[in-house]
Image (cartoon, helix red, strand yellow):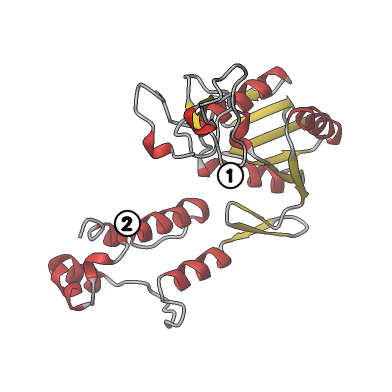
Amino acid sequence: MQGYKQEHEVDFFDTFSATTQLESVRFMLAVAASFNANITKFDIETFFLYGKPDTDIYIEQPPGHEILPEGAPTSHKPKDYVVLLNVALYGCKQSPRLANEDVTKFFGSIGLSPMVTDSQVFVLGTFPSNFLILLLFVDDGLCVYNDTKLFEQLMMNMKKKYTLKVEHNPKDFLSLEITYHKNFLKLYQTGYVRKMLKDFHMHNCNSVATPITKDQTTAITETPVSLTYLPNTNDFPMLTLCGRLLWLVRLSRYVFEIDICYKYKDN
């Protein structure tokens, strides 16, 4: 599917797809630790294929699946015909939104209610006596619950419609690593940080207790040209670095000067 060829207001209209707030992930895990609740994560396989197109989308016939419609002239070839999509494919600009609308309506049909503060966090049962809280981030879901029957009923209903990968007591979720202890959970992103350092060729650098001092902040702010001695400075993916640092901060609440990096994102 070559989504870049789609034309706005012809092949698609809205593309925005809701995702959960990262603060909700910490909230869910805090509830699990406080109430000694169970934690299970799941992945909806081929998630985008469950969305139904809201516009007519025609595509060229994929290689190996070319067919001639009944009654077509013998002089015609399969490549002379296109096919109408019945499901949203990966690559369609509106696929994430359509798939999210489909699963959100499904959750409502089986009794799950979205929270007012986060439309991608759903509640079932009565808190705190017997409850199930479900969080959805695109096709990744996290369940926190103290009523096993509610969870089993949820999984039974979901498996009637979706193909799921389910993992109890997961060791990670959205790059957030989880270690289970008797009265608390330990959350960290060591693997994410190490991969980020390797991607930006900083895995051999020495660590420091203080990432940046006030004097260094002033120096960088006053003399941004100090970076020009680096080779291919303009090619450095600064915006990518800022985004990955921001993900780290919002999910684990690390504290450091990200705004210093943002000063150079447009360089």
- The residue drawn where x is 16% and y is 68% is 224
Element on which disc 2 rests = helix
The correct choice, above or below, for 246 with respect to 39 in the image is below
- The residue drawn where x is 72% and y is 53% is 170
Name the residue type under label 1: Val
Toward the viewer: 103 or 78? 78
Mark 2 Cα-neighbour bin, 10 Å: few <14, some 14–19, many ≥20: some
Q: Position of residue 197 (x, y in %)?
A: 45, 71
Toward the viewer: 91 or 42? 91
- C-alpha separation, residue under disc 1 versus residue under disc 2: 25 Å
- The residue drawn where x is 23% and y is 61% is 264
- The residue drawn where x is 85% and y is 36% is 148
The correct choice, above or below, for 138 with respect to 247 in the image is above
Split into 4 quadrants, where in the image is the C terminus?
bottom left
Q: Which mark is residue 25?
A: 1
Q: Position of residue 143 (x, y in %)?
A: 71, 40
The correct choice, above or below, for 3 with respect to 115 in the image is below
Mark 1 Cα-neighbour bin, 10 Å: few <14, some 14–19, many ≥20: some
Q: Which residue is mark 2?
A: 239
